[in-house]
């Protein structure tokens, strides 16, 4: 049997998963999403063009690939169909020919999106800073055992299930004092999208995955990042799914023994979008410089991302949680001009120094301790061979590898497919 190799974000999302899946997808015939939904925004750049995919696996652009929207994903029919249309228009690719959808994936209804907005508004200052795509309410209905699934579309009582759930949502919206117009329910648009979804093959993902693995490996593409994991992230400022390796098993119906390599992606600095604690956040000119050089604006919402130095305490935690076998470092080229580069190597919590990620990292609880490195002050963007990388830079790379006890096997030096150095 072949294995499911996994690509995971190790920080607060936006690590560059889209680019890496696109690079690796050349080696895998099958790419699968296993959690999350249109809250993801995976950017790809090739042949001078840029794309952002949200619910569709980043493998879609590779010729001959098969792509799976797994059971653990929450799928918004309206946004999914519009994503398919943009891909078709831009590339001529016909997504329905190379994408299958797991029957057990839950559907995001327009009322889930309204509820997301209503709950965030009601939370005031304590809001999560959600992407407002309906992710939290949809997963709540899943675990609350009220959800509507892709496989329900094929059953005769789909409309009743939809009506039952939306009726419940309308009550909840009323309780929250949230006003909306009839058109916000997007009922016509929703059912038109459902009709068009029928052009796709719905599969029992667990059997489909098992059959594929008899023939070839699968690449599982994580969304969000480990620090947004609903169990292990900076709760409650997290997303509503398991973004760590365990999510691959439940999200695809693949047993733990089927998991092969676990690629963990991180940026050479750190970003976060939305609310919640971020120990190494920079509020000064350096933070702004990182945002400017790294173009740190959300691919889904356009929000400016909060920026800070790399947090090795949080990264080590993420590496352990998912059993990362290979690290992939992104965007170190964005640090080219800095005189000094800092890495958080421990926290002070309640007066004690620790390198263990603590239960509570809420603002003020944690003081990061930094180790400083001299900047390499060299443009890395055009370097294509490991031996051409400056020694000062390689010292920084080796320090991170040592700290995390894991090899950095790919160094990405720009958004394009070609700007990738694989270390042998
Ligand atoms: P990709 O896959 C960065 C953040 C939101 C918010 C929190 C909860 O592109 O890395 P949600 O809409 O999931 O209920 O929002 O999680 N968030 C992301 N941040 N990248 C993402 O995805 C994210 N998906 C959700 O900003 O703080
Ligand atoms: Mg993103």
Image (cartoon, rainbow, N blue to C red):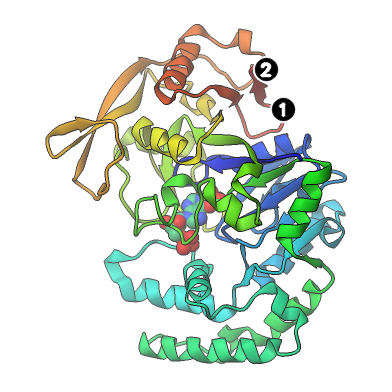
Instruction: Write down the quadrant of residue 300 in the picture.
Output: bottom right
With 265 as the anchor, is 419 left or right in this view?
Answer: right
Picture residue at 65% right of the left edge, 86% below the top:
187
Is the CB of mark 2 within 8 Å of ligand 1? no
**Measured from the top left, where is residue 377 in percent x and y?**
46, 14
The residue indicated by pointer 1 is 418
Asked if the residue under mark 1 is in contact with the one under mark 2, i.e. CB atoms within 8 Å, the reply is: yes
The residue indicated by pointer 2 is 384
Question: Quick one: 178 or 370, which is closer to the camera?
Answer: 370
In the rendered image, which quarter contains the N terminus? top right
- Closer to the chain start, of discs 2 and 1, is 2
Residue that sits furthest to the left in the current view: 351
**Measured from the top left, where is residue 353 in percent x and y?**
19, 30
**Measured from the top left, where is residue 266 in percent x and y?**
50, 35
With 190 as the anchor, is 166 left or right in this view?
Answer: left
Measure the C-alpha gap from mark 2 to mark 1: 8 Å
Picture residue at 68% right of the left edge, 33% below the top:
416
Q: Residues within 10 Å of mark 2 (few under 14, many from 20)?
A: some
Q: Secondary structure at mark 1?
A: loop
Q: Secondary structure at mark 2?
A: loop
Q: Which mark, by number, is residue 50?
A: none
- Above or below for 411 versus 241: above
Residue 86 is at least partly visible in this image: no
Picture residue at 81% right of the left edge, 74% below the top:
198
């Amino acid at each position: 049997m072949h294995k499911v190799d996994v690509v995971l974000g190790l920080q607060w999302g936006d690590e560059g998963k889209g680019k890496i899946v696109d690079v690796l997808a050349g080696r895998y015939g099958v790419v699968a999403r296993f959690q999350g939904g249109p809250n993801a925004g995976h950017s790809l750049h090739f042949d001078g063009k840029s794309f952002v995919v949200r619910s569709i696996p980043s493998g879609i652009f590779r010729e001959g690939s098969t792509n799976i929207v797994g059971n653990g994903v929450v799928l918004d029919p309206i946004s999914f169909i519009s994503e398919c249309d943009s891909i078709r228009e831009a590339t001529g690719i016909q997504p329905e020919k190379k994408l299958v959808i797991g029957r057990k994936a839950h559907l995001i209804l327009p009322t889930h999106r309204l509820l997301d907005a209503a709950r965030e508004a009601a939370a005031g200052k304590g809001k999560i800073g959600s992407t407002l795509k309906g992710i939290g309410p949809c997963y709540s209905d899943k675990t609350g055992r009220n959800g509507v699934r892709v496989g329900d579309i094929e059953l005769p009582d789909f409309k009743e299930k939809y009506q039952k759930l939306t009726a419940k949502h309308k009550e909840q919206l009323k309780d929250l004092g949230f006003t909306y117009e009839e058109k916000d329910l997007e009922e016509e648009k929703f059912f038109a999208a459902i009709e068009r979804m029928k052009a796709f093959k719905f599969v029992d993902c667990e059997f489909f995955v098992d059959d594929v693995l008899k023939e070839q490996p699968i690449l599982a593409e994580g969304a969000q990042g480990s620090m947004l994991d609903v169990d292990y992230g900076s709760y409650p400022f997290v997303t509503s799914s398991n973004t760590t390796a365990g999510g691959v098993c439940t999200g695809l119906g693949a047993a733990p023994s089927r998991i092969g390599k676990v690629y963990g992606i991180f940026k050479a600095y750190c970003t976060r979008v939305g609310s919640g604690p971020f120990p190494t956040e920079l509020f000064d000119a350096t933070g702004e410089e990182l945002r400017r050089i790294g173009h740190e604006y959300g691919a889904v919402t356009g929000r400016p991302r909060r920026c800070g130095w790399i947090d090795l305490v949080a990264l080590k935690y993420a590496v352990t949680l998912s059993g990362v076998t290979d690290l992939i470092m992104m965007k170190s080229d964005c640090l080219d001009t800095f005189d000094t580069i800092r890495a958080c190597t421990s926290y002070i919590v309640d007066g004690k120094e620790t390198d263990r990620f603590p239960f509570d990292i809420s603002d003020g609880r944690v003081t990061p301790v930094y180790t400083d490195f001299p900047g390499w002050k060299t443009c890395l963007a055009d370097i294509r061979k490991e031996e051409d990388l400056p020694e000062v830079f390689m010292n920084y790379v080796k320090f991170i590898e040592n700290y995390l006890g894991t090899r950095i096997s790919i160094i990405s030096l720009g958004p394009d497919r070609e700007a990738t150095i694989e270390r042998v």
